[in-house]
Amino acid sequence: MLGLGAVAAHACSNLMGLCGTCHDFTLTDPVQCRRLGWIVPHGVAQPLDVPARMVTVNGVGWWYLRDDAGYVWTEEETALAVIRLYGMA
Ligand SMILES: [Zn+2]
């Protein structure tokens, strides 16, 4: 049985599919990736509560990843305010 931390770590809201180049970017520039919502520091916020800037079939912008594997768009101004709120910018 998975503990609560392991369940959260494997929640869909905590998973992004990235190409190899973008994955490498998360390793070489984590500060910028926090600003994009691609990396959510452990203990700072729940990934469910932080939008990520990404490309989807519905367009490029800021999206909240959901635990049902969907995503919900949000305005850039709102997204950047959330990123600042959690000290990720
Ligand atoms: Zn990419």
Image: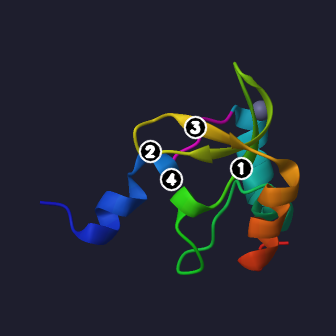
Residue on which the image places disc 1: 52
Instruction: Name above or below for residue 22 compared with residue 48.
Output: above
| Residues at discs 1 and 2 in contact (Cβ within 8 Å) | no
Identified by mark 4, the residue type is Asn
Q: CA distance from mark 4 to mark 3?
A: 12 Å
Number of the label disc, if any, that sits on residue 12: 2
Residue 84 in picture, x, y percent from top left: 81, 74
Q: Residues within 10 Å of mark 1 (few under 14, many from 20)?
A: many
Q: Earlier in the sequence, mark 3 or mark 1?
A: 1
Image: magenta residue range:
14-18
Q: Residues within 10 Å of mark 4 (few under 14, many from 20)?
A: some
Residue 83 in picture, x, y percent from top left: 77, 67
Q: CA distance from mark 1 to mark 2?
A: 13 Å
Residue depicted at 61% across the width and 39% down the height: 72
Identified by mark 1, the residue type is Ala
Q: CA distance from mark 3 to mark 2?
A: 10 Å
| Residues at discs 2 and 4 in contact (Cβ within 8 Å) | yes
Residue depicted at 41% across the width and 60% down the height: 9
